[in-house]
Image (cartoon, helix red, strand yellow):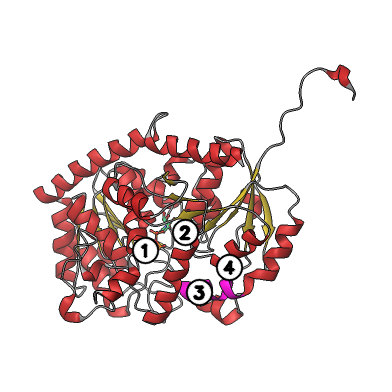
Amino acid sequence: GGDGDGGEKPPPQRRVLVFPLPFQGHIDPMMHLAGVLHARGGLAITVLHTRFNALDPALHPEFRFVPVPDGVPADVAAEGKIIDVILAMNAAVHDALASALAEEDGGAACLVIDANLLAVQRVAREIGLPTVVLRTGSAACLRCFLAYPMLHEKGYLPSQESQLYMPVPELPPLRVRDLFQTKISSHEMLCEVIARINETVRNSSGVVINTFEALEPAELEKLRGELDLPFLLAAGPLHKLSSKKTTGSSLLHQDKGCIDWLDTQPVGSVLYVSFGSLAAMDSGEFLEVAWGLVNSGHPFLWVVRPKLVQDCDSVALPEGFEDAIKGRGMVIQWAPQQEVLAHRAVGGFWTHSGWNSTLESVGEGVPMICRPNAVDQMMNARYVENVWGVGFELDGELERGKIQNAVTRLMDEREGAEMRERAEVLRRKVAECLESSGSSQIAVDKFVSYILSL
Ligand code: UDP
């Protein structure tokens, strides 16, 4: 030691803690954001993770992992309903987290949390740790959350059957049916969860949204006016910004065999079909989808996850289905979705319109058939059809003839070709926001400077 060494010691590496909500659509964007902060910002990362839907630290050797007892009771974990898990975690996380944070000796600069984790934010506040919220949905969705009290005062919510197609002029282009809603929990419970999200957002030091400026310019501008926060950054699509592969955070095994099969298919010929990690259908609808796909005559890659059919732990394909597709279709349990959408053989995506799936499709210029069911999926589909013009909704009862028509409309007809062209324009905008001086890169730079200023 002493003065004679010459040279200054490099400053200690700043550390950021991240705490995702343990569901696929929330974990992936958080892990990508962490990857970007690590790779581009040179920041050290600690992932606080739960036993429920636990991540495998071995797959992320560049990060430190600290397990946090999540307080999710076994029956709630087995059911896996997102709202119940959110409520359980918020009720139980306090003491467990306080001791985990006390053990983390890194002197972290800040904690990046999912917006659903108000209880985590409270613990961080107690120890003087600033929190930044990652919103894994769209900017439009966050606007809808913030507008929830108004939507009730004005009588849009709880929605009534007769008003579903009524426009909501405060949130254009949404109609009542497009507002954030859920069928699986009570309205009061949903209001409570959204009120907490809003409180978490308002109490934060800033918000990062997984969207990009050119996709939702008006929504972002309005949000910046509505929220008085030090920063509100559009840093998406995070999966494109990060060099990390999602395989490390996939909760189900991704069947890579489908890529070899896609390699054998003509360019733009395959319809990729997946309804995300949570959506489920009844067994009658499942049959209609199966035969609608067969009858469409198009090659298809269909993700049938083990719990896709309600009240059924393992799904059986209908009799005669395998013979009928004659190698023209492939069914797998879980796909490497980003690779699939980027594959040249894929020409369309039939999706449940989850935000991650929507962004992943937009990022590869793939037009969509939207079959939204709940939460933010209705509004995502509305934007796909009405604002970006890169797909259309398939609504009403699922019936094989309608499905066949929808596939033809997207894959063979002029209208579908126009959607594909617009999707290509949008894909180029994604590429622009990812360039070195693109809007999402600038957003990341701002976020890193904020962290380094702490
Ligand atoms: N996904 C995947 N393989 C599949 C289906 C989905 O890896 O077979 C990924 C997909 O790439 C996306 C996430 O799971 O990142 C689903 O998130 P989304 O927001 O679309 O829907 P959610 O599952 O939350 O309803």
Alpha carbon distance from label 2 to label 3: 25 Å
Residue on which disc 3 sits: 80
- Viewer-side residue, 153 vs 286: 153
- Amino acid marked by disc 1: Leu
Q: Is mark 3 within 8 Å of ligand 1?
A: no
Nearest to the eye among marks 4 and 3: give it. Answer: 4
Is residue 61 rendered to the left or right of residue 173? right
- Give whichever of discs 4 and 3 has the lower sequence position: 3
Residue on which disc 2 sits: 201
Residue on which disc 1 sits: 146
- Give whichever of discs 3 and 1 has the lower sequence position: 3
Residue at x 66%, y 55% (from the top left corner): 128
- Residue at disc 2, secondary structure: helix
- Give whichever of discs 2 and 3 has the lower sequence position: 3
Looking at the rendered structure, which numbered label has been put on residue 371? none
Looking at the rendered structure, which numbered label has been put on residue 119? 4
Residue 4 in which image quadrant: top right
Instruction: For residue 439, say whether it is visible.
Output: yes
Query: How many residues crowd around disc 2 within 10 Å: few (fewer than 14), some, or many (20 or more)?
Result: many
Alpha carbon distance from label 3 to label 1: 26 Å
Q: Report the span colored magenta.
A: 82-91
- Residue at disc 3, secondary structure: loop
Q: Which residue appears farthest toward the left when viewing the image? A: 414
